[in-house]
Amino acid sequence: MKLKELTAEQRRIAVDAAQLYQHSTDLQAERQTLRGGLYWKTVSGHDYLIRITDRRGGNRSLGPRSPETEKAYREFTDTKRDLDMRIKSINDEVARQAKFCVAAGVNRVPRLAADIVRSLDASGLLGTHLIILGSHAMYAYEMAAGVQLKAGLLQTEDLDTLLNTKSEMELAGSIRSGGLLGILQDVDATFKPQRKRSFRAVNAKGFMVDLIRAPIDSANGLALTSIGSGIDLIAEQLRGLEWLTALPLITQIVIADNGFPVRFVVPEPRVFALHKLWVSLQPTRDPIKRKRDLHQAEAVVQLALDYFNLRFDDEAIKALPSELTAMIPGLVERINDRRTKTQSGKTALPPGFEYPDND
């Protein structure tokens, strides 16, 4: 597998950008708890402190004017003002660091995809209801490893998002109203569904965003099939996607091509690689995509072994469905053959591949 390790300077710049961005998102989350506002309302000659609770004008009274409500009003406005100043200051630093990221060449993720994922994150969907899949997930794995993979493994004109049909977190009313399509159109107004009740949205330049989901177990009742309650993308059901959430998800901050960071949430690398390999073996898979699936699977396997210190013979992997674990011996042989070409005389299996024979 051809890859380039980041230099110490590139690593420093990327880590600094990620830390600044994480601090910014933490402040933004704190600011969200203060959304809306407080104001005094006079009713029958008496002042009441009112809290705005939503964008539609919902509100509730916090009580009549008193030393306690006046203190609450001062603390609320002072805290909100302080947070706004801190957010502006840290975002200025993020913008400054973005220039260093571009200059250092750690800016990898296409801007449109990064803007979309950043909006998904800001809406509260990323990691709870939506997970990034496909070629774009590879950006998270390479950044986590501190390497850059061959461009051909990463370049794509579509963004795959996996709908978590079993999420127990309730969607905000504004998100249910606009749906995934509304979020996409906020980023690029030219996004339209490919057809009625489609799983895919396409923009004017042909960039596609797909919404896919695992098969729903009818025995467990209804599950989420879309984000919005109105006109929105309807997730396409694909077998095997349920395996991608069998192991804990990975969160990684990556850098967009304009130098600005964005948080990705992706499947655990080993299960991603095994699923990619399984997809490459499906007879209905497009032959061109099948070869790329195989190369992506092998690349992530190498990262898992050489950079993440993960194994393919531990209890977590053994607990996966046999359709995935049955492929490991063949994958072992391919990776081993590739390694022995560069390590003369060595024929032992790579570390982490001591997979026991099935009884």
Image (tube, rainbow, N blue to C red):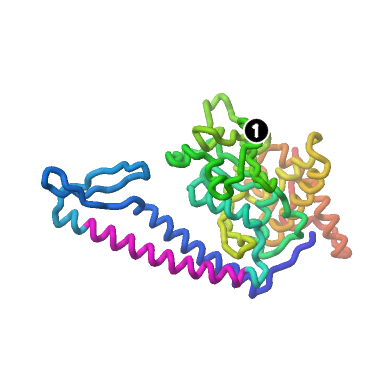
The residue identified by callout 1 is 195
Magenta-tinted stretch: 72-101
- Quarter occupied by the N terminus: bottom right
Give the residue drawn at x 54%, y 71%: 96
The question of residue 281 being in magenta is answered with no
Residue 215 rendering spot, x and y as whole percentages = 62, 31
Callout 1 amino acid: Arg
Give the residue drawn at x 59%, y 30%: 216
Residue 61, can we see it?
yes
The question of residue 92 being in magenta is answered with yes
| Magenta stretch, overall SS | helix
**Please, is residue 194 above or below residue 292 in the view?**
above
Question: Which residue is the extreme one toward the left?
Answer: 45
Q: In the visual, does 39 lie left or right of 64?
A: right
Residue 93 rendering spot, x and y as whole percentages = 50, 70
Quadrant position of residue 142 = bottom right
Residue 317, can we see it?
no
Few, some or many residues within 10 Å of mark 1 (<14, 14–19, 20+): few
Residue 82 rendering spot, x and y as whole percentages = 34, 65
Q: In the visual, does 173 lie left or right of 5?
A: left
Give the residue drawn at x 57%, y 25%: 218
